[in-house]
Amino acid sequence: MSDGNDQLTFADLRKRAGLTQRQLADAMGVTVKSVSAWERGVVEPRLTFAETQQLTEILGCSFQDLVDATNSPTPES
């Protein structure tokens, strides 16, 4: 189905890391509503550099993957 060029969404990165929205929220010290808003593209994460590094470590992705995912539209279910 994928041709290898599909861009991952923020939700894809979280799911690939095996985390629920609650687990990611707890790990980052934010609310589940914040994580949901990030995934839906309603708001972009407003994080310090250290928090961004922490998020990439939690998600097991590169900084560029995170940037690309937060700029990727999330299809509505």
Image: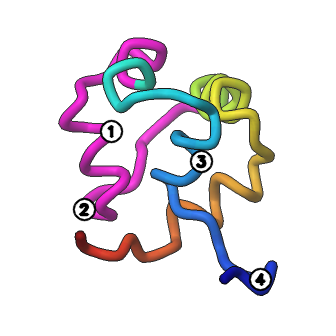
Give coordinates of residue 38: x percent, y percent: 35, 51
Per the image, the residue denoted by label 4 is 5
Identify the residue under disc 3: 13
For marks 4 and 1, give the one nearer the viewer: 4
Q: Residue 71 appears at what percent x and percent y? A: 52, 71
- The magenta region covers 25-48
Residue type at mark 3 is Leu
Distance between mark 4 and mark 2 Cα atoms: 24 Å
Amino acid type, label 1: Val
Among numbered discs 4 and 2, the one appearing first in the sequence: 4
Q: Amino acid at mark 2?
A: Val
Q: Are marks 3 and 1 in contact (CB under 8 Å)?
A: no
Mark 4 / mark 1, whichever is N-terminal? 4
**Helix, strand or loop status at disc 1:** helix
In percent of width and height, residue 70 lies at: 51, 61
Q: Which residue is mark 2?
A: 42
Q: Residue at x 44, y 24 (%)?
A: 24
Q: Is residue 40 above or below residue 72?
A: above
